[in-house]
Amino acid sequence: MPDFDVVILGAGSAGYSCALRAAQLGLSVALVDDTPVGGTCLHRGCIPTKAWLHAAEVRRTVVTAAAFGIAATLEGADAAGVRGYADSVVDQLHRGLRGLLAGRGVTTVAARGRLVTDGAGPAILADGELYRGGAVVIATGASPITLGLGIDGKRLLTSEDALRLDTLPRRAIVLGGGVIGVEFASLWRDLGVEVVLVEAAERLLLGEEPGHSRILTKELRARGVDVRLGAALEDVTATDDAVTARLGDETLTADVLLVAVGRRPATQGLGLEDAGITLGDSGHVQVDERLRTSARGVWAAGDVVAGPQLAHRGYAHGIFLAEQIAHLRGRLPVRPTLPADRDMPRITYSSLQLASVGLTAAEAGQDAQVVDYRLGGNGRALLLRSPGERESGVVRLVRRPDGPIVGVHLIGDNVAELVAEGALLVGWQATPDDVAGIVHAHPTLGESIAEANWALAGRGLHTPA
Ligand SMILES: Cc1cc2nc3c(=O)[nH]c(=O)nc-3n(C[C@H](O)[C@H](O)[C@H](O)COP(=O)(O)OP(=O)(O)OC[C@H]3O[C@@H](n4cnc5c(N)ncnc54)[C@H](O)[C@@H]3O)c2cc1C
Ligand SMILES: NC(=O)c1ccc[n+]([C@@H]2O[C@H](COP(=O)([O-])OP(=O)(O)OC[C@H]3O[C@@H](n4cnc5c(N)ncnc54)[C@H](O)[C@@H]3O)[C@@H](O)[C@H]2O)c1
C-alpha cells in the first residue's frame, strides 16, 4: 500500500469529517473501519433514535388529534414499520456519505485496524496490510457501559438493541436518566409502552439547569412515565418471559430493560499503549489542546477524547485535525482553532425537548444575571401544545454582570431548532444590547429568544414589568 498523508482509524462523525476535510485540502487519506462508514451517530445513534422519536410524535399527534378538532382513530404502532422508516433515512444518508468519500478520493478500508509504530513512524495495520500515515488519527468512538448485566439483545438491551426490536415491549424499565434514557423513556411512552425510568442521581439530565430537569420530570410523569430518582436497581434477572429487578422493597417486572448508564471510550485492543499513547483513568486518550497524543504523529478525535460525547463535537474535532495537519504540511496558511467543549450545544430530543449551550446559572457564578422567559407567552409555542397541556416551557438566558450572554437554556416543544441562535449568541459573546435590534419573525419560537434578550437589556415587551 502507498503511504498516505493521513490514515484515520474509525469512520464515525470524527473520522469521516476529518477524511472529507483533509481530502478537500489536497491530502491523501485512508479511512479504516470494519463497519459501514458513518459510525454510531448514523447507524446506531442520532439518526435512528430521532426517527423513532419522530414516529412516536406522529402516534401522539393521532392520539391527541381530537383536542385540535380532528377526528382520528389509532389502529396501532408497528415496530417493524418504524424500523423500516428509520432504516430508509439511514440508508439514504449512508449512500450520500459513501458517494462523498469516493468523490473526494478517500481510500476506504473495510477492516478492523490497530495502531503500530516502528522506526518509520505510525501506521494502521488492517487485514495484514500496513497503512502508513504522515499523521494517524484515532477516532474509534465509544461503546455502552453494561454494568456486567449480561446484555442478551432480547430482554436486556443496549440502545443499539432497542433500535432493532421487532415488536414493541408492553412494559420497559429504563436504567439511567441521562440523554439516552430520557429519549427512550419519552419515545416508548409515546408509542404506548409502560415505562419505569430509574435514575441513581436526584435528578434527570445532570448537566442541565436543575429547574429544567424538574420541568421535564413533571412532564414525563404527567404523560405516564414512572420516574424514580435517587434509586438503585438490584438483582436484575432475565428469563425467557420477562425481566425482573429489585428497587428497594419492590420487584419491578417488564418485558425489557434498557441499560443507558453512559458510554466508555473504545480504546482497548488497538495497540495504543504499546505505541506510547497515554490513556486516562477513564480509558480516554490523553491529548493536548491541539488533540495531539503522547505518540509522535498520532492524534485523537471524537468520543475517545474526554468531554461531551456528541456528533457535532466529533465533526468539530475532525475538521480541526484535517486543517491542523494541512497547516503543518504548508497546505493551509491559517492555524485552525479548536472549538471549546463549553461552546458545544446539547440537545435532548424527548418531549419536552431540552436544548442548551454555554454555562448554567450556577456555573456562571453568583453575580450572573439570569432571565427566564416562559413560553406560555409565545404564540407559536402555544400552537404546538395540545389545548389543555399546561407546561409550555422556558427560555433561560445567563449573562455576565452587564457583559456577554454566556448561557442559553431551553425547554419546550421543538426548542432544539432554537439552540443554533443560542450557539451564535454564546459563541460571539454577544451582549443583549448587541442583538436587541435584530427582528425575529412572528409567530415563531425564535421570538422567545428576542423577548428574553429584551428582558435582559431591561426593555422586555411581553414580559411582566
Ligand atoms: C443512542 C444514541 C443516540 C445519540 N444521539 C445523538 C444525537 O442526537 N446528537 C449527537 O450529537 N450525538 C448523539 N449521540 C452520540 C454520537 O453518536 C457520538 O458522539 C458520535 O457518534 C461520536 O463520533 P466518533 O466518530 O467519535 O465515534 P463513532 O461514531 O462511534 O465512530 C467510531 C467508529 O470507529 C470504528 N472502530 C472502532 N474500533 C475500530 C477498529 N479497531 N478498527 C476499525 N474501526 C474501528 C467503529 O466501528 C465506528 O464506526 C448518540 C449516541 C447514541 C448511542
Ligand atoms: N441527543 C443527544 O445529543 C444524545 C442522545 C443520546 C446519546 N448522546 C450521548 O451519548 C452519551 C451516553 O448517553 P447516556 O445517557 O448513556 O449517558 P449519560 O452519561 O448521559 O447518562 C447516564 C445516566 O445514568 C445514570 N446512572 C449511572 N449508573 C446508574 C445506575 N447504576 N443506576 C441508575 N442510574 C445510573 C447517571 O447518573 C446518568 O444520569 C451521552 O454522553 C450523550 O452525549 C447524545
Image (tube, rainbow, N blue to C red):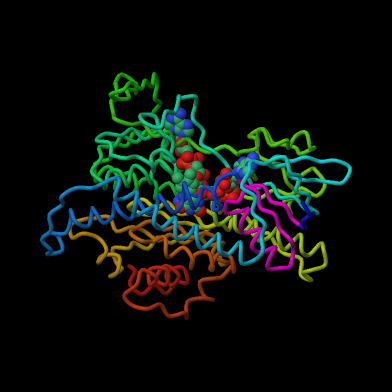
Between residues 285 and 351, which one lies in front from this camera angle?
Answer: 285
Q: Which residues are magenta?
A: 6-33
| Image spot of residue 314 (x, y percent) | 59, 54
Q: Is residue 19 above or below residue 460?
A: above
Q: Is residue 34 left or right of residue 113?
A: left
Q: Quadrant location of residue 259?
A: top left
What residue is rendered at 77% in x and 46% in y? 123
Answer yes or no: is residue 431 visible. Answer: yes
Residue 31 sits inside the magenta stretch: yes
Between residues 429 and 320, which one lies in front from this camera angle?
Answer: 320
What residue is rendered at 80% in x and 49% in y? 297
| Image spot of residue 43 (x, y percent) | 48, 49
Between residues 174 and 155, which one lies in front from this camera angle?
Answer: 155
Answer yes or no: is residue 208 visible. Answer: no
Residue 426 sits inside the magenta stretch: no
Q: Quadrant location of residue 13?
A: bottom right
| Image spot of residue 299 (x, y percent) | 73, 49
Q: Is residue 64 above or below residue 172?
A: below
| Image spot of residue 62 (x, y percent) | 19, 56
Q: Quadrant location of residue 175?
A: top left
Which image quadrant: the C terminus?
bottom left
Residue placed farthest to the right in the image? 119
What residue is rendered at 36% in x and 45% in y? 214
